[in-house]
Image (cartoon, helix red, strand yellow):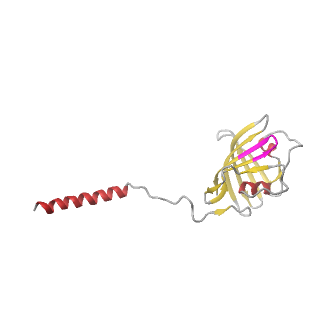
Amino acid sequence: MQFPLMTNRFFLFLIFFCLFSSSCSSKLYSIKSPTSKDINLVEDFLIEGKFKYTTNILNKRGYFLLIKKDNKLDIVLGRNFLLPERQFSFELTQSLDLGELIGESPSSDRENFKISVLLSYIKGSPLKPEDKTLKVSYPNGFSYIDNYRMPIKIMFEKEDVQLILIIKKVS
C-alpha cells in the first residue's frame, strides 16, 4: 500500500515542477524580422540618430532627426535634450552645405550636396563616380534597424571635415 501513495506524491511533485519550470523559462524570438525592407526615398520616413561633426577647429556632437514628407526634408539638430533644437526645412532638389547646417560660417571652398544625394548615402547607396571629392564609408556594415536594412554608422569625409552619423531608429 505504501507504493501507490509514493507514486502519487512523485507525480504531483513532477507536475508542479514542470509547471514552475515552464512558466519561468524565457521565450526565444527571432532577431531578424521576416518582413525586412530597404528604405524607399519616395515614401515618407523618419530617421533618428546621433552625429559628430569634426574639423580642424570645431568638434560638435548631438542628435538629429530627418523627417521626409512628400517632397520636403525637415532636419532637426540638437546638442542635448535640455538645449533648444535647430530646425531646417529643405526641398529634395535643394543643395546643402553641412558646415552651415552645423553652425559654421559660410565658406566658398566647401562643396554643397544635393539633399536627394545625401539621403541616398544615408540609405546606403554606393558612391557615384562623379563624387570623387567626398569619401563615404560604412565601417560597421549594414544591419536591420526597425525592419529596415540600413547602415548603422555612416562616415562622410572630405579633406579636413568629417561627419559621422549613427542611425538609432527608422520609421
Total numbered labels = 0
Q: Residue at x 63, y 56 (%)?
A: 143
In the rendered image, which quarter contains the C terminus? bottom right
Residue 114 is a magenta residue: no
Image coords of residue 71 (percent x, y): 78, 60
* Residue 93 figure quarter: bottom right
Residue 157 is a magenta residue: yes
Of 65 and 127, nearer the camera is 127
User: Does residue 137 sit above or below 38 in this rendering?
Assistant: above
Query: In the visual, does 150 lie left or right of 96?
Result: left
Residue extending farthest bottom: 35
* Residue 42 figure quarter: bottom right
Stretch in magenta: 156-164
Residue extending farthest right: 108
Of 94 and 113, nearer the camera is 113
Image coords of residue 89 (percent x, y): 77, 52
Q: Residue at x 77, y 57 (%)?
A: 72
Query: In the visual, does 162 lie left or right of 170?
Result: right
In the rendered image, which quarter contains the N terminus? bottom left
* Residue 9 figure quarter: bottom left
Residue extending farthest top: 57
Helix, strand or loop: magenta stretch: strand
Image coords of residue 50 (percent x, y): 67, 45
Image coords of residue 164 (percent x, y): 72, 45
